[in-house]
Image: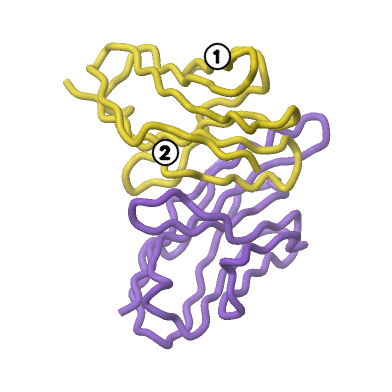
Amino acid sequence: DTGVSQNPRHKITKRGQNVTFRCDPISEHNRLYWYRQTLGQGPEFLTYFQNEAQLEKSRLLSDRFSAERPKGSFSTLEIQRTEQGDSAMYLCASSLNREVLAKNIQYFGAGTRLSVL
Amino acid sequence: DAKTTQPTSMDCAEGRAANLPCNHSTISGNEYVYWYRQIHSQGPQYIIHGLKNNETNEMASLIITEDRKSSTLILPHATLRDTAVYYCIVSIYSNTGKLIFGQGTTLQVKP
């Protein structure tokens, strides 16, 4: 168990550019979540995958945001035409959900901090 | 999802017990109480969860009132490394599992 890994840790970009973040969950975890956290606030839910299926998206996830989880393993979060308001910490979490054993304890990565200039 | 109310900040002396309260008066019968904490510049870390019975693990104890409208997280012997933001969250067991974070309680452990 190597934990949830997120790359890059920091990303600085200019307004209007596209960025992509990667999350590698704990192996065999079938659930994967993306959250966004701005300074002084708690994390906000963005989207959720069960295996490769994206089952829920928050209203916060505008059409400039897209997330994928091909083959139910790693996930990517892409932001197109970045805006200054996209500056935040993007957190990924994974959990294991198997029927009766499900506790849905989420394990978080350290996050990717995005700064849009 | 039920909302929670927590004090904005608390202080605790190193070595003493830290008692962090949480109100969740609108909790429904199938919702669990989860506690996570976030140390500066890190992702949130799971601490403990419970439904209606008190729970204890190696990190903390969780006391849930009989009417389930409030709970208290207890760190029995706080250390400086316990300085963090503590989040109390209610979530339906085995649903999508998304966590709805509030602003949490900033716990400052002082020497």
* Disc 2 to disc 1, C-alpha distance: 21 Å
Residue A21, compared with residue A107, is above or below; it is below
Instruction: Give the numbered dot on residue B108.
Output: none
Residue A82 locus on image (x, y percent) = 44, 81
Tell which chain the image draws in yellow: B
How crowded pointer 2 is (Cα within 10 Å; few <14, some 14-19, many 20+) is rated as: many
Please determine whether, in this image, residue A21 is positioned above or below residue B51.
Answer: below
Colour purple belongs to chain = A
Res B56 label: 1
Image coordinates for residue A57, horizontal then vertical, percent: 67, 63
Residue A14 in picture, x, y percent from top left:
34, 84
Tell me the chain of label 2. Answer: B
**What is the residue that sits farthest to the left in this orientation?**
B111
Q: Which residue is mark 2?
A: B104
Q: From this viewpoint, is residue A80 visible?
A: yes
Judge left or right: residue B54 versus residue B88: right
Q: Residues within 10 Å of mark 1 (few under 14, many from 20)?
A: some
Task: Indicate the quadrant containing the N terminus of chain A: top left, top right, bottom left or bottom right.
Answer: top right
Does any portion of residue B59 appear in the rendered image? no
> Toward which corner of the image does residue B74 lie, by quadrant?
top left
Q: Secondary structure at mark 2?
A: loop
Specify the farthest residue to the right. Answer: A99
Is A36 displayed left or right of A94 in the figure? left
For the point 37% across and 37% down, which residue is it? Answer: B85
Determine whether the residue tagged by mark 1 lies in a helix, strand or loop.
Answer: strand
Q: Quadrant of residue B111?
A: top left
Q: Earlier in the sequence, mark 2 or mark 1?
A: 1
Q: Quadrant of residue A98?
A: top right
Q: Quadrant of the C terminus of chain A?
A: bottom left
